[in-house]
Amino acid sequence: MVIQQDEPKTTHKEFKLKDVLIGNLSLIVICLSVILVLVNQNVITIDEIFLKMNLLESACWVAIPSVFLLLFGAVLTKFIPAIYIDDTNKSYQYLPTGVLVIFMFFSALFEELLFRGVIQNLMDLGFQHDWLAIILTTMLFLAFHIQYYTKPIMLLNIMIPSLMFGWIYSATHNLLIPFIVHFILNVGTTLLFKYKILRLKE
């Protein structure tokens, strides 16, 4: 989940979409390879990753959590001063919309393949307890975002969505659902700031 402010107050490194895409695509290929090995070795099954769902059920699982998480992000902006937000997150809204959508798409895809597709599945197999797997995966998700350690409120900002992504995956066994919700959340929140619908508290 990302939060931005109205105007950049620091100079940010130039965002190089090509470099980011190469990095994300490399990580996505690695995650897919691990998942394929797990399936091939009968550690997990295809139905545990991409269980077929009807269109209405899938739409509900996407729409309701997406609305909740966007509202959650909007509420946080009313209480969190801009000084507590990570500088990188403040800069995303200034990217061209097309670049923003592509970046968010591949970032969300990598994170869901890694944290839900690989880690949560392995945790669930190891502990045989859905919520323990979700919580442990979320702890690793927080640990992965080391850039937020100096601004701990950002950890709350990603902890709630991560728990929800984990719950959605546990309930649906369809990795596409948390991925789509993750993508909608990141893009939706950023666009709300980009077009001045939301503003951070100064």
Image (cartoon, rainbow, N blue to C red):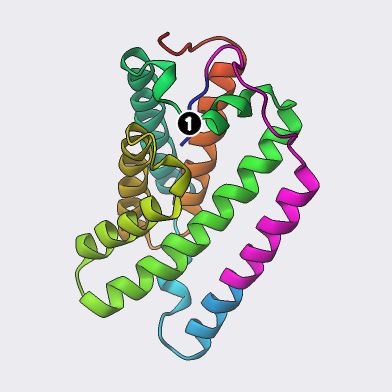
Residue drawn at x 49%, y 63% as measured from the top left: 114
Which is nearer the eye, 114 or 81? 81
Residue drawn at x 38%, y 15% as measured from the top left: 81
Q: Is residue 153 above or below residue 32?
A: above
What is the quadrant of residue 83 in the picture?
Answer: top left
Chain part drawn in magenta: 5-31
Left or right: where 81 falls relative to 105: left
> Which residue is denoted by mark 1 in the rendering?
86
Which is nearer the eye, 165 or 141? 141
Image coordinates for residue 137, horizontal then vertical, percent: 33, 60
Left or right: where 187 falls relative to 17: left
Identity of the residue furthest to the right in this view: 18
Left or right: where 99 falls relative to 198: right
Q: Quadrant of the C terminus?
A: top left
Task: Indicate the secondary structure of the residue bearing disc 1.
Answer: loop
Residue drawn at x 38%, y 40% as measured from the top left: 158
Image coordinates for residue 102, horizontal then vertical, percent: 70, 41
Q: Is residue 108 above or below residue 68?
A: below
Residue drawn at x 70%, y 60% as measured from the top left: 25
What is the quadrant of residue 153 in the picture?
Answer: top left
Asked if the stretch drawn in magenta spans residue 154, the answer is no
What is the quadrant of residue 109 in the picture?
Answer: bottom right
Asked if the stretch drawn in magenta spans residue 9, the answer is yes
